[in-house]
Image (cartoon, helix red, strand yellow):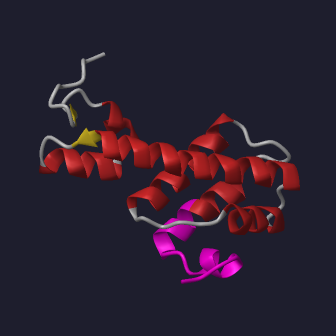
C-alpha cells in the first residue's frame, strides 16, 4: 500500500490520465463547471476501480500542480464526499442485469437510468 504522493504515482495509467487531464485543463485560481465535471469523472473512476486516496495526498498533489492550498483542500474534500456518495449509492441499488452493471461502471449518467432497481425491488420512476 502506498501513502502520500507515492499513492498518486502508483495509480493505474488510465486513472492517472484522468487526473492529469483535470490538472492540465483546470482553470486557476478557481476551477470552472467543466473543470468540476472532469474532477468528478476522476472521482468516479477511482470509485469504480476501488482506489482510495487520502485527502492529504490528493491535496498535496494538487498544490504541487498549481492549485492554492484552499482550492486543493476544497477539491480533496469534494473527492472524499464524492467517494462516500458513490459508495452509499452503490449500496442502495442493485443492477437489474449485466447490462446495467456495465452502464454503472462506464457512465455516471447511467445512475439515473429508469431500469435500475432499488434493493427494495421497486423500479425507479422514469423522469
Residue 2 appears left or right of 59: left
Q: Quadrant of residue 100?
A: top left
Position in image of residue 39 (x %, y %): 60, 50
Q: Residue at x 78, y 67 (%)?
A: 60
Q: Residue at x 63, y 39 (%)?
A: 34
Depth order, front residue of 27/88:
88
Q: Main secondary structure of the magenta part?
A: helix
Depth order, front residue of 59/85:
85
In the rendered view of the protein, which quadrant contains the C terminus? top left
Position in image of residue 112 (x %, y %): 33, 30
Q: Residue at x 81, y 42 (%)?
A: 30
Report if residue 68 lies within the magenta region: no
Q: Is residue 60 above or below residue 120?
A: below
Q: Which residues are magenta?
A: 1-18
| Residue 68 in sight from this viewpoint | no
Residue 115 appears left or right of 64: left
Position in image of residue 59 (x %, y %): 75, 61
Residue 56 appears left or right of 11: right
| Residue 123 in sight from this viewpoint | yes
Q: Is residue 81 above or below residue 60?
A: above
Position in image of residue 1 (x %, y %): 54, 83
Q: Quadrant of residue 89?
A: top left
Residue 19 appears left or right of 92: right
Amino acid at each position: 500500500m502506498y501513502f502520500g504522493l507515492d499513492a498518486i504515482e502508483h495509480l493505474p495509467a488510465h486513472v492517472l490520465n484522468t487526473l492529469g487531464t483535470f490538472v492540465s485543463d483546470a482553470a486557476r485560481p478557481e476551477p470552472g463547471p467543466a473543470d468540476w465535471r472532469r474532477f468528478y469523472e476522476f472521482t468516479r473512476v477511482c470509485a469504480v476501480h476501488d482506489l482510495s486516496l487520502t485527502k492529504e495526498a490528493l491535496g498535496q498533489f494538487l498544490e504541487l500542480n498549481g492549485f492554492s492550498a484552499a482550492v486543493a483542500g476544497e477539491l480533496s474534500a469534494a473527492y472524499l464526499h464524492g467517494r462516500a456518495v458513490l459508495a452509499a449509492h452503490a449500496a442502495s441499488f442493485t443492477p437489474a442485469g449485466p447490462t446495467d452493471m456495465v452502464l454503472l461502471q462506464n457512465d455516471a449518467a447511467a445512475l439515473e437510468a429508469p431500469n435500475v432497481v432499488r434493493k427494495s425491488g421497486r423500479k425507479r420512476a422514469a423522469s
